Image (tube, grey):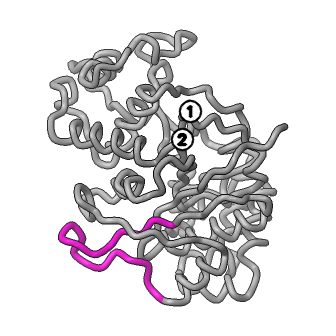
Amino acid sequence: MAETGAFNIVIVAQGGRLQYEAVILAASLRAMSPGFAGRLLVAEPQPGPLWPSDPRIRGEGTRALLEGLGAEIVPFESRCFGHAYPYGNKIEALLSLPEDEAFVFFDTDTLVTGDIMQVPFDFARPTASLRREGTWPQIELYGPGYGAIWKSLYDRFGLDYESSLDPSQPDEYWKRYLYFNAGFFFYRCPRVFGRRFLDYALAIRDDPPPELVCQPLDPWLDQVALPLVIHGLGGGRDTLPEGLLDGEVSCHYRALPLLYARESDHVVRVLEEVTAPHRIKKVLKEHEPIKRMIYQGRGQKVRALFDRDDLPPREQAIRNTIKRNGFWMR
């Protein structure tokens, strides 16, 4: 497979859990993709009126470790979301990144498990993660269906609705409609993508179509706007080969107990190997869930609860089993 061209990897980190997840991602990137020649940009929200407390990465040890792993910390201002909707960080951060430099955004709770330079990104045709469940919209008995809700959004932004549909899926089944998890996405320019993402998200939040009157937008706002952005920029659901991101090359684990419960032996081995060096362990042990799950063996106890060849079909059932056994941490 031919190598892809140069690009940056972007994550968002702030004080608390995300800063430690960022360390794990950075360590796994360096270990598993030694040929990655782009920049690892860690976008960091700055203090301001939308944050009741300082959101920046805490502790010089974490900051120094990230920089030692090759990360560049990029500050950005929260002007529209902040504490009230922290998922908006991934939208606002894009506006502070280098213009006209191709990027791949990952949520911090992602582990790099293979060579990312072998992923054939087409940065002119964006896409996002298809490892998702039908979480939105939430259909009400007497309310509009999937088609009416999604069409109202495409119409609002002057987008072609029909070409977004997957005709292999039945009408009023959620997979027929363009819907992603926002755990990764990419494009040729972060500012072009970010401006459209911000415009669409704010319009949906502040002036939604009538069809959305009963629909929850927290925490789903980013995932409602994302397919509209991707479709409007010429992308879609099939612009990457299957099995690479969210497969051989990356794992969006969401929470460490879920990683131990459902991911492959290779993923667990990568996690435990990249977090083993003393300089990394010293920082990560500051975070109690990581300390217990990785370094004190709780993760392996979670792993023993499940048969990876016969997992419950829905994530909530996995979470419930972990919680019943007293092992849930995040």
From what the image shows, is residue 286 above or below residue 329? below
Q: Which residues are magenta?
A: 42-59
Q: Position of residue 75 (x, y in %)?
A: 40, 70
Using the image as rendered, state which of residue 93 and residue 169 is in the foreground. Answer: 93
Q: Quadrant of residue 86?
A: bottom left
From what the image shows, is residue 291 above or below residue 35? below
Q: Position of residue 20 (x, y in %)?
A: 55, 74
- The type of residue carrying mark 2 is Arg
Closer to the N terminus: mark 2 or mark 1?
1
**Inter-mark Cα distance, 2 to 1:** 6 Å
| SS for dot 2 | loop
Using the image as rendered, state which of residue 284 and residue 303 is in the foreground. Answer: 284
Mark 1 lies on residue: 124
Mark 2 lies on residue: 188
Q: Position of residue 2 (x, y in %)?
A: 82, 38
Q: Residue at x 34, y 75 (%)?
A: 55
Q: Position of residue 128 (x, y in %)?
A: 54, 38
- The type of residue carrying mark 1 is Ala
Dot 2 and dot 1 residues touching (CB under 8 Å): yes
How packed is label 2: few (under 14 Cα within 10 Å), some, or many (20 or more)?
A: many
